[in-house]
């Protein structure tokens, strides 16, 4: 596996990489992840890193002008590792990984699988790396199309992503398989709510809304602060537990908006502790505005038995199904109203809590996802053998 990212940094993309690799290992596959020098190793999966660059320490998502030389280092490290590891195939994450994988594919003559988690151009626009009218937009679109078509097969984290590849990037449908994110339901499961609240210093008597994820505008965190401001005047016993990073800017904004007294910021929460803290919540929220990426936090909410309110989108409905609470995309007032209405309906929350947990186990567990991925591998290897012969 090629992971051009500071793996592992306790965020969505990295969770998919880790849980895929661990699930495949359980099936008997030998997996090696080649990644940047940053991040921490996780148990059960071998990780190989590039040489340390002491001046680069960015852990959050998003593009960077440092990426080109980091990816050159990753290419050389991947090639060196492949010569000793002798892989049967390359599983590349993100567009940079797929480009590195395309080079290795030619050199090693083995199949390349691209794990597509969103548009390269769309992500760059979401992060403000360049603007829509910038000449870089056309360049990135050309690069993105070139990379997409180098893969022998692509798996996507949503059906919408699959359709975008087919409709916008002209990928042959037979080469694109929808393999949405999953969740390890043995790691993410409900803990006693009172126990989690006691550690966080939160009273059992208050209603608690939880958020877990990156802190930036396209994840909807700015909008979430506006929602909290609306709700503060309507309920005196409502609190928000906001977990993730980088949160310094949002701590300042909350103080300026005079809503910091109803928010608990935890900063970065480790993968191993996330389920425990999520279990403190009565309701989870996902105000993600970007519509070109998957929404991995919803799987974690579900597995912990916490009902979730999210914007109405194909991706969110694909994950939550009838067990979701949906509001109009980007509508701040509607989101605030849905939070209040949900928390006031205790019986519905109890029923939804059971429903989302069961849906996570029955439909979104990596135990079944890994079999689907193994099937894609089998087709790729069969195709590779036919090509060789």
Image (cartoon, rainbow, N blue to C red):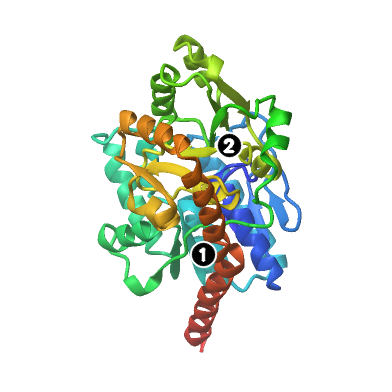
Q: Which residue is mark 2?
A: 281
Q: Earlier in the sequence, mark 1 or mark 2?
A: 2
Q: Residue at x 46, y 48 (%)?
A: 295
Q: Is residue 170 left or right of residue 197?
A: left
Quadrant hosting residue 51: top right
Residue 110: x and y, percent? 55, 73
Q: Residue at x 50, y 74 (%)?
A: 376
Q: Residue furthest front?
A: 347
Marks 1 & 2, CB-CB < 8 Å contact? no
Q: Residues within 10 Å of mark 2 (few under 14, many from 20)?
A: many
Q: Mark 1 and mark 2: span between their CA atoms?
A: 23 Å
- Label 1 or label 2, whichever lies nearer to me, is 2
Residue 29: x and y, percent? 68, 71
- 327 over 387 or under it: above or below: above
Q: Residue furthest left?
A: 133
Q: Residues within 10 Å of mark 1 (few under 14, many from 20)?
A: some
Q: Residue furthest bottom?
A: 389
Q: Which numbered marker is on residue 363?
A: 1
């Amino acid at each position: 596996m090629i992971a051009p990212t500071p793996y592992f940094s306790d965020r969505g993309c990295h969770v998919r990489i880790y849980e895929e690799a661990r699930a495949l290992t359980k099936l008997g596959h030998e997996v090696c992840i080649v990644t940047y020098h940053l991040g921490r190793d996780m148990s059960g999966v071998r990780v190989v890193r590039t040489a340390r660059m002491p001046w680069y320490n960015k852990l959050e998502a998003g593009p960077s002008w440092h990426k080109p030389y980091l990816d050159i280092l990753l290419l050389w490290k991947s090639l060196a590792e492949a010569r000793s590891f002798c892989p049967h195939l390359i599983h590349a994450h993100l567009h940079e990984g797929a480009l590195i994988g395309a080079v290795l594919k030619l050199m090693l003559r083995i199949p390349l699988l691209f794990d597509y988690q969103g548009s390269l151009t769309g992500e760059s626009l979401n992060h403000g790396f360049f603007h829509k009218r910038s000449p870089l937009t056309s360049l990135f679109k050309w690069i993105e199309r070139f990379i997409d078509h180098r893969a022998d097969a692509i798996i996507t984290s949503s059906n919408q992503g699959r359709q975008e590849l087919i409709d916008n990037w002209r990928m042959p449908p037979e080469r694109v398989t929808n393999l949405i994110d999953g969740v390890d339901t043995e790691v993410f499961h409900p803990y006693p709510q009172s126990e989690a609240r006691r550690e966080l210093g939160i009273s059992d008597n208050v209603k608690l809304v939880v958020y877990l994820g990156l802190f930036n505008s396209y994840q909807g965190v700015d909008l979430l602060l506006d929602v909290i401001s609306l709700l503060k005047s309507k309920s005196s016993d409502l609190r928000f537990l906001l977990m993730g990073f980088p949160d310094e800017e949002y701590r300042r904004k909350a103080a300026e908006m005079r809503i910091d007294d109803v928010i608990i910021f935890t900063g970065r929460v480790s993968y191993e502790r996330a389920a425990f803290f999520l279990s403190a919540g009565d309701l989870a929220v996902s105000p993600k505005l970007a519509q070109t990426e998957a929404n991995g936090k919803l799987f974690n909410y579900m597995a912990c038995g916490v009902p979730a309110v999210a914007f109405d989108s194909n991706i969110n409905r694909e994950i939550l199904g009838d067990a979701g609470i949906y509001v109009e995309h980007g509508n701040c007032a509607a989101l605030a109203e849905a939070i209040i209405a949900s928390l006031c309906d205790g019986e519905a929350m109890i029923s939804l809590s059971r429903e989302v947990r069961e849906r996570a186990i029955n439909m979104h567990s990596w135990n079944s996802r890994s079999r689907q991925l193994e099937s894609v591998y089998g087709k790729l290897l069969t195709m590779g053998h036919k090509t060789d012969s």
